[in-house]
Image (cartoon, rainbow, N blue to C red):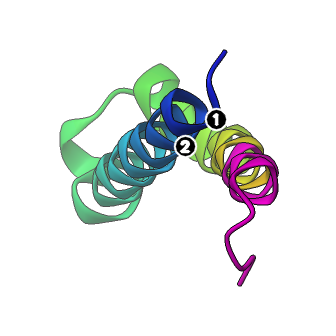
Amino acid sequence: MKAITLLKTAHITMFLFCLICLVAAVLAYGYPEKLTLAEQLVAHMSLIVLPAFIKIGYVLRLVSLDILGLPVN
């Protein structure tokens, strides 16, 4: 995979999983009375699991920046 494609993939991955985390947080804490217990459980569990995918996207970003020779910050 080309480094620039990897960088774009990393940015998309981080953005999408941040957005999904935000939705899960709103569902888990904003509307608990409108959700079933199972739906609340899934929302809370996703708040534990989803940040790992954000971190994977960040690592992909760092790797692609290193390959491109750009400053890693």
Give the answer, above or below, for where 70 lies relative to 2: below
Tell whether 33 sits left or right of 46: left
- In this rendering, the count of numbered labels is 2
Spatial distance from mark 2 to mark 1, Cα to Cα?
A: 6 Å
Q: Position of residue 32 (x, y in %)?
A: 31, 51
Q: Quadrant of residue 62?
A: bottom right
Label 1: few (<14), some (14–19) or many (≥20) C-alpha neighbours in 10 Å: some
Q: Amino acid at mark 1?
A: Ala
Q: Residue at x 35, y 27 (%)?
A: 36
**Is residue 61 located in the magenta-colored stretch of the structure?**
yes
Q: For this rendering, which residue is in front, 29 or 1?
A: 1
Q: Nearer the viewer, mark 2 or mark 1?
A: 1
Q: Which residue is mark 1?
A: 3
Q: Residue at x 25, y 63 (%)?
A: 30
Q: Are marks 2 and 1 in contact (CB under 8 Å)?
A: yes
Q: Which residue is mark 2?
A: 7
Give the answer, above or below, for where 71 lies relative to 45: below
Give the answer, above or below, for where 59 lies relative to 4: below
Tell whether 6 sits left or right of 52: left
